Image (tube, rainbow, N blue to C red):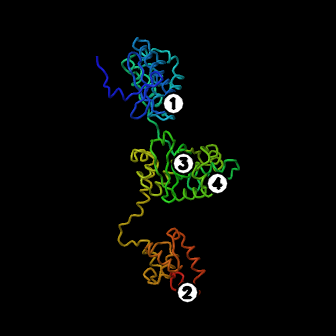
Amino acid sequence: MKTQDPEKQCLWVKTSVANLVRYKPSGIYFARVRVAGKLIRQSLKTNVFSVAKIRLADVVQEKRKSAEAEKVATNGKMTFGDALGLYRENLVSNRRLKPSAKLYREKSIQALCKTWSGLETTDVRRISEKDCLEWAARFGEQYSPSVYNNTVGTLRHVLETGIKAGARYSNPARSISKVKVRQKILMLPEQKQFLEMVQIMRSAGGRFSNSCADLTEFLAYSGCRKSEAARVFGRDCDFAKREIAVQGDPITGTKNWEIRRIPMIPDMRRLLGRLHSERSEEEWLSTPVVRVRECQKAIDAACKKLGVARITHHDLRHLFATRCIESGVDIPTTSRWLGHKDGGALAMKTYGHLRDQHSVTMAEKVRFVENEQTKSDEAKARYLFHWWESHNPLEIFWGQANEQVRLVPDDDFRKAVERALERSVKVEELASPQKLVAEFVERAPKATLIDLLRKVTLKTTLAP
């Protein structure tokens, strides 16, 4: 007779509750129960005694039910309902699946039992390939391809449970072929239409009109899923790094179980800046950025009033990806921002046509003809005086500030602006040259302005 190693035996500590032991090194409690002659030890994933007692009862009940079902299968009396009970138990104990995934599979079970009369009381041995194919033909006429495929998968899983229990040897549902899911045609609003839609939502006059508009903008500017957006707090928004940490559910995380960081595009910075200014610092850090979790009715009403196709929360995620690709962001980068883990395969399948359209547009900018002048050459040809070659910073400032085409390097232009305004200038200010010109006009001597207007001028403005 074998005896347990004393050193190993002392690692396990008995408790005052039957079938409950504690692993000494980690302090984690385990269920230790003998079922159908087999000694089973399973972690309860807690070091709290009161919690362990509650979980112990569930584990013991689950193991004994499974043993009873397997015993029934061994005797050749397993019904589909028995197999379904085992499958549901495995579904509950599966920690790799998220609650939403478990709920979806439960809905698939309900759809299966509803459309297959008498299925639960049918002996699993008597379910044939013909029965499965006839059910599939009826079910496919009533439900969408995605629901059809997922329900077929559920049927296969339940029958596979019966096979593992020894009730039968083959899976008749394997003969059912899944159908191809057609790609959804995206009917997304144009940029102007989207802004008008948001404005309609804000002016609707409802209690949550502004909050619904904020959520709509947040989803469109971030590409977040609706559930992810609801859990973005002010503390997750880093204005210095211009990025947002998307953490998802506190227990299950994001869809892919990982925290991801998405950039703050300019529109998002504007939105978050306004929301931040409307709250105290404590409230901003400790509450969700968006105050509502969904706004479908508000979106529907705005789309109807605007006369555009109805869109959903998830379509706003598509809108973000579409704008990114149309703006020149490559598909792998867009895919990473969306939280995809396939390196861009899904995004390529969904948005590949946008990449092709963008490619055609970009191709128009490629030139190989040597005699064709560039925009820079054309712009320079319009001036008599080559102010871009001047050593006078006022002339460089005045010329570039009034010219749309960049004829001097950004760094040189910034230095010229600082010399002209006699102050330091931020990079962001260079995007609004007319404001800089207005500031210069207010402080510069009249004679200086007259000299610049006379010298830095276009040929077409000169008198004949």
Check disc 4 and report its element: helix, strand or loop.
Answer: helix
> Where is residue 278 shown, x and y percent of the image?
64, 56
Q: Nearer the viewer, mark 4 or mark 1?
A: 1
> Where is residue 68 shown, x and y percent of the image?
44, 16
Q: Are marks 3 and 4 in contact (CB under 8 Å)?
A: no
**Residue tagged by mark 3?**
232
On the rendered structure, is 306 left or right of 402?
Answer: right
Estimate the spatial distance between the alpha carbons at disc 3 and disc 1, rounded to whole Å: 30 Å
Instruction: Name the kind of residue labelled 3 in the image.
Output: Val
Q: Which one is nearer the viewer's eye here, 321 or 295?
A: 295
Q: Nearer the viewer, mark 4 or mark 2?
A: 2
Q: Nearer the viewer, mark 3 or mark 2?
A: 3
Q: Are marks 3 and 2 in contact (CB under 8 Å)?
A: no
Q: Nearer the viewer, mark 3 or mark 1?
A: 1
Is residue 286 visible to us here?
yes
**Residue tagged by mark 1?**
51
Estimate the spatial distance between the alpha carbons at disc 4 and disc 1, rounded to whole Å: 51 Å
**Is 363 situated above or below 350?**
below
**Quadrant in the picture for the N terminus:** top left
**Residue tagged by mark 2?**
448
Of the image marks 3 and 4, the number of the one nearer the N terminus: 4
Of the image marks 4 and 2, the number of the one nearer the N terminus: 4
**Is 118 situated above or below 109?**
above
